[in-house]
């Protein structure tokens, strides 16, 4: 049985692919493909795979949300997940030719060679072959999308982060990511796909994943042009920037109940088509920061292309600062705060 490892990248429709596959888990299994259930976080994302590789000293929002804060509780949980995962692989081997694991956190969080080596030690021996796929996108557009997601989760990010920001740089330095995985797993088949309507089969990451990674699976029925985690409008980003300062995402170490629903409502009412557009200077800074990575990708995977992405995106005339917005009216803020409290406080 082969392993198909979908490692991201961040903000390239991974959530859409994961939820689509998870919703068709039984159909996939009947056709010889296992989409792991043991590693799922409940949404289709195989979030458990990273802590399994990094061990009990690792912590993140996923572990914290499961009240796994000390090494003893983490060890117990990780041991149970690992045993469940290996058992799932053993059962699937009788019926399936392909096993799928998907999480963008594999490229986001496994940045050290020793962590990827740990993946190899744990799982490479369980499969006949390993196929790795990563989707890539223009770093500055990915950063804007990631900024939008951070605002949804309660962070107060005022401006587009610099490409030197460690988290953002790691997320979009695709050359470094690919080199690292290729060095640890040289025998793996590596596929790099570009994210964007001009590059995706059927202008959809789901259709593209199906066509390129699961070509023998002929029963991928249903809507494939939808997306999840849609980026906020510029108006929505400005609004959440202000609300996040007034309503922290955590209280006494636990996520605030109802915040997700309130956030979705605010996203809906501000979906006015306004865009967060980077300035020419921001675009130039990003291009310079990721030039070596893009040159590596062009020379190794896209030799027939003169440029990695389709030129410069639509640009604005100035650097946007979310703090400089129309949400300064005390009466407007008061009404929005009352609406936020009403929605979040009425979640059972």
Image (tube, rainbow, N blue to C red):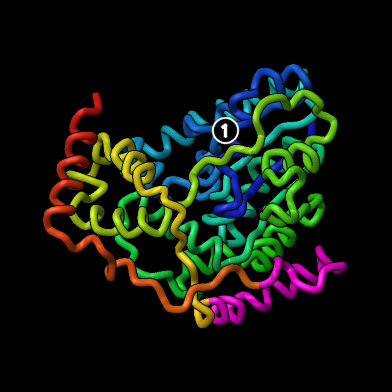
Q: Eyeballing the image, is 65 above or below 151?
A: above
Task: Judge whether residue 60 can be spotted in this image.
Answer: yes
Q: Residue at x 56, y 41 (%)?
A: 227
Compared across the picture, whether 202 is left or right of 62 comes to: right
- Comparing 230 with 92, the one in front is 230
Task: Specify the quadrant of the image occupied by residue 125.
Answer: top right
- Comparing 185 with 121, the one in front is 185
Task: Specify the quadrant of the image occupied by residue 24.
Answer: top right
Does the magenta-highlighted stretch encompass residue 241?
A: no
Q: Eyeballing the image, is 316 above or below 187?
A: below
Name the spot of residue 47 as percent of width and height, x first. 51, 40
Compared across the picture, whether 130 is left or right of 35 comes to: right
- Comparing 32 with 181, the one in front is 32
Q: Residue at x 81, y 73 (%)?
A: 306
Name the spot of residue 317 as percent of width and height, x first. 47, 78
Q: Which residue is mark 1?
A: 19
Which quadrant of the rendered structure holds the N terminus? top right
Q: Residue at x 68, y 43 (%)?
A: 204
Q: Which residues are magenta?
A: 283-311
The secondary element bearing badge 1 is classed as helix
Name the spot of residue 173 as percent of width and height, x first. 61, 67
Task: Judge whether residue 115 can be spotted in this image.
Answer: no
Does the magenta-highlighted stretch encompass residue 288?
A: yes
Q: Eyeballing the image, is 132 above or below 265?
A: below
Q: Eyeballing the image, is 295 above or below 234?
A: below
Which quadrant of the rendered structure holds the C terminus? top left
């Amino acid at each position: 049985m082969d392993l198909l490892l979908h490692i991201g990248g961040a903000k390239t429709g991974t959530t859409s692919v994961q939820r689509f596959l998870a919703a068709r888990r039984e159909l996939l299994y009947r056709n010889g493909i296992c989409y792991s259930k043991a590693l799922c976080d409940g949404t289709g994302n195989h979030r458990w795979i990273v802590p399994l590789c990094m061990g009990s000293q690792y912590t993140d929002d996923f572990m914290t949300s499961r009240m796994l804060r000390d090494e003893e509780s983490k060890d117990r949980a990780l041991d149970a997940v690992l045993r469940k995962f290996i058992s799932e692989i053993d059962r699937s081997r009788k019926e399936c030719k392909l096993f799928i694991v998907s999480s963008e956190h594999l490229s986001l969080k496994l940045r050290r060679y020793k962590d990827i080596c740990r993946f190899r030690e744990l799982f490479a021996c369980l499969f006949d072959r390993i196929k790795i796929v990563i989707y890539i996108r223009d770093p500055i557009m990915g950063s804007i999308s990631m900024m939008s997601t951070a605002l949804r989760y309660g962070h107060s990010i005022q401006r587009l982060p610099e490409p030197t920001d460690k988290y953002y740089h790691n997320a979009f330095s695709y050359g470094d990511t690919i080199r690292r995985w290729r060095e640890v797993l040289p025998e793996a088949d590596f596929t790099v796909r570009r994210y964007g309507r001009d590059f995706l089969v059927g202008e959809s990451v789901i259709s593209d994943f199906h066509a390129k990674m699961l070509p023998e699976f002929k029963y991928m029925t249903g809507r494939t042009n939808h997306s999840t985690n849609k980026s906020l409008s510029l108006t929505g980003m400005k609004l959440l920037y202000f609300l996040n300062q007034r309503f922290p995402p955590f209280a006494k170490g636990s996520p605030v109940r109802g915040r997700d629903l309130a956030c979705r409502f605010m996203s809906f009412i501000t979906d006015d088509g306004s865009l967060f557009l980077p300035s020419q200077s921001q675009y130039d800074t990003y291009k310079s920061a990721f030039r070596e990575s893009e040159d590596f990708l062009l020379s190794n995977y896209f030799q027939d292309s003169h440029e990695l992405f389709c030129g410069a995106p639509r640009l604005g005339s100035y650097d946007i600062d979310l703090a400089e917005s129309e949400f300064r009216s005390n009466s407007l803020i008061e009404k929005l705060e009352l609406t936020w409290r009403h929605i979040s406080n009425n979640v059972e």
